[in-house]
Structure formats: C-alpha cells, structure tokens
Image (cartoon, grey):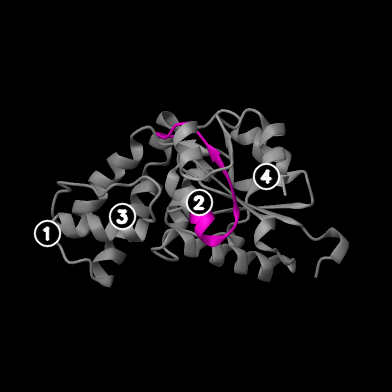
Amino acid sequence: MTAPNTLPRTLVLWDVDHTLIETRGVGRAIYDRAFPAATGRPLVKLAQISGRTELDIMAESLRVNGLEPTDEAVKKLADALVKGYEDARDELAATGRALPGARKALQQLAADPAIHQGILTGNLREVARIKLEVFGLDRYLDFESSAFGDDHADRPELVRIARERTEAQSGARFELRDIVLIGDTPNDVKAALTAGVRVIGVATGKNTETQLREAGASTVVPDLSDVARLIEGGNRR
C-alpha cells in the first residue's frame, strides 16, 4: 500500500463531453447507426443527452421510439454503441477534438501527487475509454477509480461510486470537501451539490458561465486554458 504521507488528498473527477473533448457530431452519427443495429428500427428521436447518464438516455430513447427499455434491449443498444465508437475511431479523431487547455490541465494536475484524477461521466465505460484514448487523454486518468453511465442511472450516485472505488484503489480517504467535480452542464453542478462535493463549472459546452453559476457552481471558468485558476478553484476550502 502507498505510504500515508504520499497518499493523494484531493480527488478530481472529470466529465468528458464538452469538458475535455468534443465529438462534433460524430456521437450523434454513431447513435443513428447503433440504434437500428440493436433494435432493427431507425432512430426517429433521440433523448436529450446533455448532462445525463447513458443508462437514462438509452432507456428514454427506446421508449420514445416505441420500444420497451428492458434490460436486454438496453444491453443490446449499449453493445452497439461501444462497437460503433470502436469502428469510428478514425472518424472521431478526424472530426472531434480535445478542447483547448484540456491536455495541459490534465498534465499539470497529474504532476501533483496530492491530486488523484478520475472520471465522472454519463458515457458508458468503454465509450469514455475510446473517446479519451483517441485524443491521448486517457493516460492522465485512473479508469479503475472512476464512475460511468453504465454504473448507475442517477448521476449523483456516480460521485459515491467514484469515491468508493478511489478509496479502495488508492488507500486514501476523501472527505466530501476533498472531492472536486469538473463539468460543463447544470446537471454536473446538481450532481456535485446533491452529493455534497465541490464543483468547478467550465463554460465549454452549451451552457454559459452565468447559467452554471445560477445552477450553483461557486467556481466557474470560461475554459481550461487558465490552469492556475482552475487548480486554485479546485483547492479552495
């Protein structure tokens, strides 16, 4: 086990889409291909995606397209989505991007032994892995002490799951004030506040800085380029 004086003191949990990366339409295209592959029907309507878990999105998407979201139907759709992203790695690399400052922010936080970086995302685990691998960001994040959209349909529950996994993996213990969630949507902010942890809102998605503050984020940055400010916000007590 890691010596006590070298254990991390802060757990930083990163959202993925519109916080670290953008698929720039590739994600929707993959859904359009995966849905009929899994169900035999075209995707007429996709559930609202922003800030939600994939379990929630898949269940609603099945319902609004006239299908019962049974465990089997959800699993088939999840498997089709993972295969869709695996097959579209080159497409994603060519069309999507890592957001400005994302790599630098991850690198700088990774260099601090007091900080442990994980993921808290609505994406399926393997979809998140593919997205981050495509843009070379996976090396800075611990997938084993993270939480994903196939772990639970309720986003605040993902905070609990990530905390328990990180403590089991690292041997460290994190009070709620030692956990920072970084995300771009009011749902990210709500998840953090519901779970009782700190949150940094990043206005790199569809929501403005004002909207993120109105949702309850006390620390909001326009993007990830100001790493010093980001870390200052994350370490604020």
Q: What is the number of the mark on residue 129?
A: 2
Compare marks 1 and 2 and give the one earlier in the sequence.
1
Count every numbered label the image shows and give the total.
4
Q: Is residue 186 above or below residue 148?
A: above
Q: Secondary structure at mark 2?
A: helix
Residue 115: percent from the left, percent from the top?
73, 51
Residue 191: percent from the left, percent from the top?
48, 55
Magenta residues, start to end: 191-208
Q: What is the number of the mark on residue 79?
A: none
Q: Which residue is mark 3?
A: 57
Kindly identify the residue that appears in the image at 22 percent across and 52 percent down.
Answer: 35
- Cα distance between the residues tagged 4 and 2: 24 Å
Q: Which residue is mark 4?
A: 234
- Cα distance between the residues tagged 1 and 3: 14 Å
Amino acid type for the residue under numbered disc 2:
Arg
Q: Secondary structure at mark 3?
A: helix
Compare marks 3 and 4 and give the one earlier in the sequence.
3
- Cα distance between the residues tagged 3 and 4: 29 Å
Q: Is residue 52 above or below residue 230?
A: below
Q: Is residue 45 above or below residue 62?
A: above
Q: Which residue is mark 1?
A: 66
